[in-house]
Image (tube, helix red, strand yellow):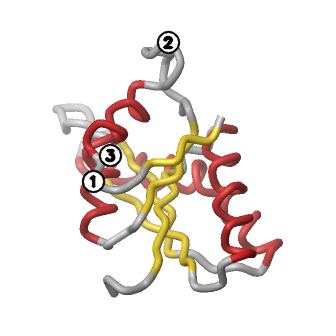
């Protein structure tokens, strides 16, 4: 629903995304009308002669479970719910597109994820999300 107050937290399994989730959960404690959406984005992998679509799907499922495991434990421990989604695509564009499609009012994310350091202060995905998003982006160090 567009009237719900939804906050999107991209999760990649990194300590930075865990801190972003912790920040969002603190806000939920003070604003019970706030709903958290977790999104894990898996980069696309092309099939080949030796790698089938089924193998790629299995890989994406395994990696997304691994990335979301800590977030799921935190939610269970606090007895809080969240909408959890996995998408395949380019991370920044997928995050922004998902936030738009789910009518999220804000994106809360870490400074850098598990990828290599491409930005001096912020990771390349975070920087790109900031530039593409039409909603506020809160960056948690």
Query: In the picture provided, is 138 more to the left or to the right than 75?
Result: left
- The residue singled out by tag 2 in the image is 120
As measured in the structure, the alpha-carbon distance from the residue carrying label 1 to the one carrying label 2 is 24 Å
Q: Is residue 59 left or right of residue 14?
A: left
Which is nearer the eye, 18 or 89?
A: 18
Q: Nearer the viewer, mark 3 or mark 1?
A: 1
Earlier sequence position, callout 3 versus callout 1: 3
The x and y percentages for residue 116 are: 49, 18
Among numbered discs 1 and 2, the one appearing first in the sequence = 2
User: Which residue, given by chain and number where applicable, does mark 3 sit on?
Assistant: 56
* Helix, strand or loop at mark 1: loop
Q: Position of residue 80 (x, y in %)?
A: 70, 79
Question: Dividing the picture into quarters, in which one does residue 23 lie?
Answer: bottom right
Instruction: Give the Cα distance between marks 3 and 2.
Output: 32 Å
Residue in the foreground of this view, choosing between 136 and 57: 136
Vertical arrangement, residue 118 with respect to residue 52, above or below? above
């Amino acid at each position: 629903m567009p009237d719900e107050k939804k906050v999107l937290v991209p999760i990649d399994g990194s300590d930075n995304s865990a801190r972003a989730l912790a920040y969002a959960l603190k806000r939920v404690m003070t604003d019970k009308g706030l709903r958290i959406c977790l999104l894990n984005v898996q980069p696309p992998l092309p099939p080949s002669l030796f790698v089938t679509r089924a193998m790629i799907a299995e890989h994406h499922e395994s990696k997304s479970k691994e990335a979301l495991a800590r977030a799921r434990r935190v939610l269970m421990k606090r007895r809080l719910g969240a909408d959890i989604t996995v998408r395949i695509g380019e991370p920044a564009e997928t995050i922004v597109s998902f936030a738009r499609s789910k009518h999220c009012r804000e994106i809360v994310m870490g400074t850098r994820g598990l990828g290599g350091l491409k930005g001096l202060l912020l990771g390349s995905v975070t920087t790109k999300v900031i530039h593409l998003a039409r909603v506020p982006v809160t960056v948690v160090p």
